[in-house]
Image (tube, rainbow, N blue to C red):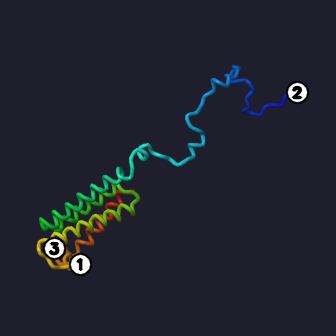
Amino acid sequence: MTTPLEPGERVPGDRSGGEPSPPASARTILDRPPGDRYGPATDPADRSGGALERAGPPLAVAAVGVALFVLLGGVLAVTAGLLVVAGLVGWLTGLFVRPPARAATVAVGVVLLGLAGIWLFGRWEGGVLDPIEYFAEVQGILVPFELVVAAGLAAATSR
């Protein structure tokens, strides 16, 4: 006597229509084990590049940003236009750096390096003020605004 089948159970040796089961050599072999789908997701682009490759675009943004700060703020003596450069640096940094807190930190660092470059250019021209007095005298309240604009746009773009 045979045991009754439960709903959805197949008859042994029957493949949806009474066909016999294929021999063991004709069975499908998977490319990877089924349990691999529960592992961490990896993007093929992440595996191809090293740390130096991933750091290239943010380093380029930093170098160009610092150069623009020194050119505009030091050589051309533009002050209000540095807000636009700070916003551009923040926006571009947010495109390449994640998460938002790290992007904001990097953008503020780039702006601070640019401001240090402006101060060093002023020293090279014969200035004698320390950085705090120099920026209080030359740019005044614009320095904190530049930092906030860079950090805000970097964090907003990085999401």
Indicate the amino acid at tag 3: Arg
Residue 135 image-quadrant placement: bottom left
User: Residue at position x 40%, y 44% from top?
Assistant: 48
SS state under label 3:
helix
Residue 50: give x, y in percent of width and height.
39, 49
Q: Position of 20 compared to 50: left or right?
A: right
Indicate the amino acid at tag 2: Met
- For the N terminus, the image quarter is top right
- Nearest the viewer among 136 and 114 is 114
User: Residue at position x 22%, y 76% from top?
Assistant: 131
- For the C terminus, the image quarter is bottom left
Name which of mark 2 and mark 1 comes first in the sequence.
2
Q: Position of 43 compared to 103: left or right?
A: right
Indicate the amino acid at tag 1: Ile
Q: Position of 74 compared to 21: left or right?
A: left
- Furthest residue toward top: 19
Which mark identifies residue 132? 1
Name which of mark 3 and mark 1 comes first in the sequence.
3
What residue does disc 2 label? 1
Q: CA distance from mark 3 to mark 1?
A: 13 Å
Residue 76: give x, y in percent of width and height.
12, 65
Residues under numbered marks 3 and 2 in contact, where contact means CB atoms less than 8 Å apart = no
Q: CA distance from mark 2 to mark 1?
A: 96 Å
User: Which callout, 3 or 2, points to the residue nearer the camera?
Assistant: 3
SS state under label 2:
loop
- Categorize mark 3 by other alpha carbons within 10 Å: few (<14), some (14-19), many (20+): some
SS state under label 1:
helix
Residues under numbered marks 2 and 1 in contact, where contact means CB atoms less than 8 Å apart = no
Which mark identifies residue 123? 3
User: Residue at position x 29%, y 68% from top?
Assistant: 147
Residue 149: give x, y in percent of width and height.
28, 65
